[in-house]
Image (tube, helix red, strand yellow):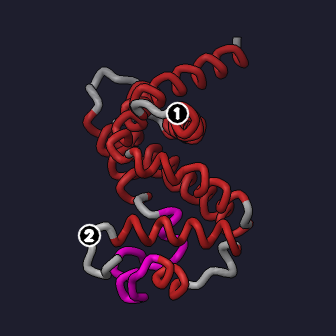
Amino acid sequence: MGRWEPDARERLVRAALDLFSEQGYENTAVAQIAERAGLTKSTFFRHFRDKREVLFGGQDVLAELMTGAISSAPAEAGAVEAVEAALVATAETFTDERRAHGPQRLAVIAGNDELRERAALKMVGFAVAMTDALKQRGVPELEAAVAAELGVLAFNHGYERWLETGGDFAEVARRTFSDVRAAVGSLVA
């Protein structure tokens, strides 16, 4: 495979996930990833800031999609409806390629304390972004924070469901958010 081929990013992701699975995240160097992909180390850094980015890249895009959907939700939409719209808006990033790598990615993260911490921080970032967007709509802070945290819970469970079942992430997100709302309702009833 030549270095010029257009699927460099995908090749780097595949190589990184394979190496992380084979020898552990902490024992894998960027040079090894690039070599496995048939690319140079500088090509790796054109696509990713560091090897963690292979696992967590795209967080900014997801947060922007979420906050944009909350901001553009109809004025009459409540906090929960706006958060549901935020989850649905992320569906455009959930491709077949992402689904193919998902289980391996989750296994790599689960096997490393640093990566589990990074994954948790990513979810905190989503909650903060959604809370701030809701507050910009005039939602009181506590209500905004609760709705955002429910959104993060639904996002995580929806992602796992989507990996298992496939299909349209938007529909999976809607169904999962509905299930989370029902669970909360049964707790406070």
Residue beneath disc 2 = 6
Sequence-wise, which precedes: disc 2 or disc 1?
2
Provide residue 188's location: percent of width, then percent of height: 70, 17
Q: Which one is in front, 11 or 112?
A: 11
For the residues bearing labels 2 and 1, Cβ distance under 8 angstroms: no
Q: Is residue 153 visible?
A: no
Q: Which one is in front, 58 or 9?
A: 9
- Specify whether residue 19 is painted magenta: no
Provide residue 110's location: percent of width, then percent of height: 71, 57
Residue beneath disc 1 = 147
Bounds of the magenta segment: 37-56
**In the rendered image of this protein, does residue 187 appear above or below residue 133?**
above
Q: Which quadrant of the figure has residue 67?
A: top left
Residue type at tag 2:
Pro
User: Which quadrant holds the C terminus?
Assistant: top right
> Few, some or many C-alpha atoms within 10 Å of disc 1 (few <14, some 14-19, many ≥20)?
many
User: Which quadrant holds the N terminus?
Assistant: bottom left
Q: Residue at x 27, y 26 (%)?
A: 75
Task: Give left or right: position of 82 versus 180.
Answer: left
Provide residue 149's location: percent of width, then percent of height: 57, 39
Q: Residue at x 51, y 71 (%)?
A: 15
> Few, some or many C-alpha atoms within 10 Å of disc 2 (few <14, some 14-19, many ≥20)?
few
Gap between marks 2 and 1, in whole Å? Answer: 41 Å
Residue type at tag 1:
Ala
Secondary structure, mark 2, is: loop
Q: Residue at x 26, y 26 (%)?
A: 74
Q: Which quadrant of the figure has residue 29?
A: bottom right
Q: How many marks?
A: 2
Task: Give left or right: position of 145 versus 185.
Answer: left
- Specify whether residue 38 is painted magenta: yes
**In the rendered image of this protein, does residue 186 appear above or below residue 23?**
above
Q: Residue at x 41, y 41 (%)?
A: 135
